[in-house]
Image (cartoon, helix red, strand yellow):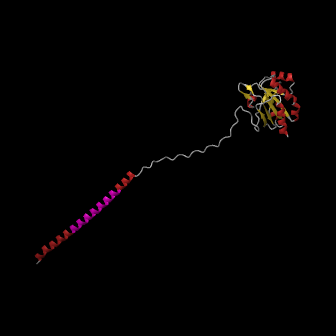
Amino acid sequence: MESNQRPKRARTAAATVASKAAAASKKSTAAASKKAKTSTKAAAAAAAATTARATAPKVKKTAAKPAAAAKPAAKPAAKKKGGPLEVGTEAPPFAVNDQDGAEVTLESFRGEKNVVVFFYPKDNTPGCTKEACKFRDLKDEYDRLDCEVLGVSADHEVSHGKFVAKYGLNFRLLADTYRSLIKSYGASKAGDKIQRSTVLVDKEGKVAAVWNPVSGAEQHPVRVLAKLKEIMM
């Protein structure tokens, strides 16, 4: 009886082993299939991403432009160098010798007198003589308005002295031989010539009126006097 049961147990054991082997094989196959599916999905996803990158429109990177610098405020127009003085501005200082060699400065009149500075081309010429003699004739009226009259040209002191003596001029003539005063007051013009012109400076050293150029030399001192009276009122 014992001998008959051994073959049966052997068959049963073999069947069990075979069953386990089959189950293991099935499990292994399922795992392999799942892994293959996962790999396939991953590959498909990677391929899709690659395609998307390849077909996506390229965006050109543009460097940001720096902000434009703010434009500085426009500067007020400056007075043309050598041009006429402007009313209300500070009259340029000067120190020039008169016909007697005495120095005359604008600063010496500050706070005390108005000053008429008239520029003329040359001593002993027709227009300049008429203008100078008219200032001479009106000198008392200028004095009553606390106003000093000064004539200016590029003639030297000796020439001025003769001009004063010849016509009995009762005011000083400044010998601006270097033309520094002539240029600073805008009385210089092309060809090294002098523009007949006049500047009225008030007691505070400010430019009160400008005539540049002067028209009608003989009657010009009358117009200057009228302007001075207007300012003094």
Left or right position of 127 against 66? right
Q: Which residue is drawn at 30% across and 61% down?
A: 37
Q: Give the range drawn in magenta.
A: 20-45
Name the image quarter holding the N terminus. bottom left
41 inside magenta stretch: yes
90 inside magenta stretch: no
Residue 152 or residue 26, whichever sits in front: 152
Find residue 94 and report its horizontal and vertical position in percent: 77, 31
Find residue 224 and report its horizontal and vertical position in percent: 82, 33
Q: In this view, does 13 lie above or below 91?
A: below
Residue 85: which quarter of the image?
A: top right
Q: Is residue 120 above or below residue 41?
A: above
**Count the marks: how many?**
0
Residue farthest along the front direction in this orientation: 216
Name the image quarter holding the C terminus. top right
Residue 168 or residue 15, whichever sits in front: 168
